[in-house]
Image (cartoon, rainbow, N blue to C red):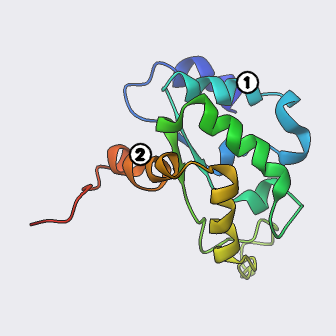
């Protein structure tokens, strides 16, 4: 979908945010269709990407090590256009009939947050991803009121 809308997305006058690594699949790596488009939109500053929900894109849990190159490529493309999210409450990606309640996926949030240090070893860039970028994108205050 991102590939089909890339030209339109690049001209929108509002911020665009791709959730879940833009839907990139860890096992397919950088040669997958659409990878260059997602990275290109982030690099150009026309889109943000949320590095969240690794469990949706990788079957290598609990640490999802195969998503690391994807996270690092997106951060390298433009660290000012990356935000992090826990993806809590971890909706279960298994599709069920609408009347059936799906229990949340069992995800270790602490382990997920620990991955950010592996993806982004530089503390100043992690601060951008965790504090500065979301504050700019969503209009959050960056300091406590006086």
- Pointer 1: what residue? 36
- Pointer 2: what residue? 133
| Figure quadrant of the C terminus | bottom left
Q: Is residue 24 visible?
A: no
Instruction: Say which residue appears at 83% left-offset and 28% top-offset.
Output: 33
Secondary structure of residue under mark 2:
helix
Left or right of residue 94: residue 7: left
**Disc sitting over residue 103 in the figure:** none
Q: Is residue 58 visible?
A: yes
Q: Please tell me whether residue 44 is drawn above or below residue 14 in the rendered image.
A: above
Left or right of residue 126: residue 98: right
Q: Quadrant of residue 140?
A: bottom left
Looking at the image, which is closer to me, 31 or 123? 123
Instruction: Name the mark nearer the viewer: 2 or 1.
Output: 2
- In x, y percent, where is residue 100? 75, 81
Asked if disc 2 and disc 1 are in contact, CB closer than 8 Å, the reply is: no
| Figure quadrant of the N terminus | top right
Instruction: Say which residue appears at 61% left-offset and 38% top-offset.
Output: 75
Looking at the image, which is closer to me, 68 or 13? 68
Left or right of residue 139: residue 25: right
Instruction: Say which residue appears at 90% left-offset and 39% top-offset.
Output: 28
Secondary structure of residue under mark 1:
helix
Looking at the image, which is closer to me, 19 or 141? 141
- In x, y percent, where is residue 93? 77, 65
- Graded by Cα atoms within 10 Å as few (under 14), some (14 to 19) or many (20 or more), the crowding at tag 2 reads many
């Amino acid at each position: 979908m991102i590939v089909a809308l890339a030209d339109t997305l690049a001209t929108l006058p509002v911020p665009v945010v791709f959730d879940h690594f833009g839907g990139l699949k860890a096992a397919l790596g950088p040669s997958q269709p659409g990878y260059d488009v997602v990275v290109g939109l982030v690099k150009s500053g026309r889109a943000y990407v949320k590095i969240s929900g690794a469990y949706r894109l990788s079957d290598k849990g609990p640490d999802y090590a195969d998503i690391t190159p994807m996270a690092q490529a997106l951060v390298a493309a433009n660290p000012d256009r990356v935000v992090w999210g826990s993806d809590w409450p971890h909706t279960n990606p298994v599709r069920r009939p609408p009347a059936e309640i799906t229990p949340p996926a069992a995800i270790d949030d602490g382990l997920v947050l620990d991955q950010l240090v592996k993806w982004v070893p530089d503390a100043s860039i992690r601060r951008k991803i965790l504090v500065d970028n979301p504050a700019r994108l969503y209009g959050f205050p960056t300091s406590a009121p006086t």
